[in-house]
Image (cartoon, grey):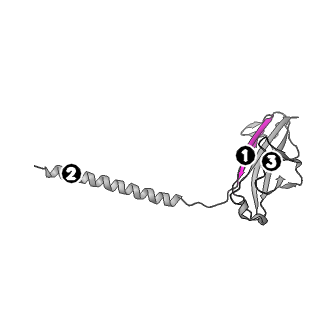
Amino acid sequence: MIDKKKFLYFNRITLVVIIIFLLLSVIKIAFSRFFTEGDGEAMNDIAFYIIDPGTQSQTLNLFDVKPDGKDYIYHLDISNYKDNQVSEVDLEYQLELTTTTNIPVEYKIYLNDSVINEFHNKEILQDEDGVYFFKFRTPNQQFQKNIKKTNHYQLVVNFPSSYNEEAYQDLIDSVEIVITATQM
């Protein structure tokens, strides 16, 4: 014969487990709906810390640039200190940008809110695979030893609205930023 007490006890346990499972499923759906939407145009901020002579590089992919004629601004900070460590020698550095030629964008660069009118040694290069690149160099900048200093660069990228054509859809340009520091 079936024991009614045990039967009711197991039914309650089964019912509680099903209710907990349903609650977890509903909560998961509610939280995923809450967190799925996000909107905004965050441009990358890149920081370089030059404490010793050497070369540093970082690649910046321009996913957000659209042919709308608007300026897209990327911030680059170059410092001769990090935390409590400051460069113990006078340093001179050069900022070099190497870009792909996938899309016809225009580049401008500002140093501490002053425009650098011309890139030095603007050249077109071709690698061994036949891919073309633009290479730009800014004028050399100097840091004095034991004095904390940060140079704030703004890389302004403009994709003219005249290129708002199907041929330019889904193209991505890439910028490699190379900082070469030498001891003075």
In this figure, which residue is indicated by the disc labeled 2? 9
**CA distance separating discs 3 and 2:** 74 Å
What secondary structure is the magenta-colored segment mainly?
strand
Q: Secondary structure at mark 1?
A: strand
For the point 75% across and 52% down, the residue is: 75
In this figure, which residue is indicated by the disc labeled 1? 59
Q: Judge the density around disc 2: few (<14), some (14-19), many (≥20) Cα neighbours within 10 Å.
A: few
Q: Position of residue 24 (x, y in %)?
A: 39, 54
**Range drawn in magenta:** 42-64
Q: Name the residue nearer the viewer: 170 or 54.
A: 170
Q: Quadrant of residue 28?
A: bottom left
Left or right of residue 124, residue 166 in this image: left
**Mark 3 touching mark 1, by CB under 8 A?**
no
Give the label, 3 or 2, closer to the camera.
3
> Which numbered marker is on residue 133?
3
Between discs 3 and 2, the one toward the N terminus: 2
Q: Position of residue 76 (x, y in %)?
A: 76, 49
Q: Position of residue 73 (x, y in %)?
A: 75, 57
For the point 36% across and 57% down, the residue is: 22
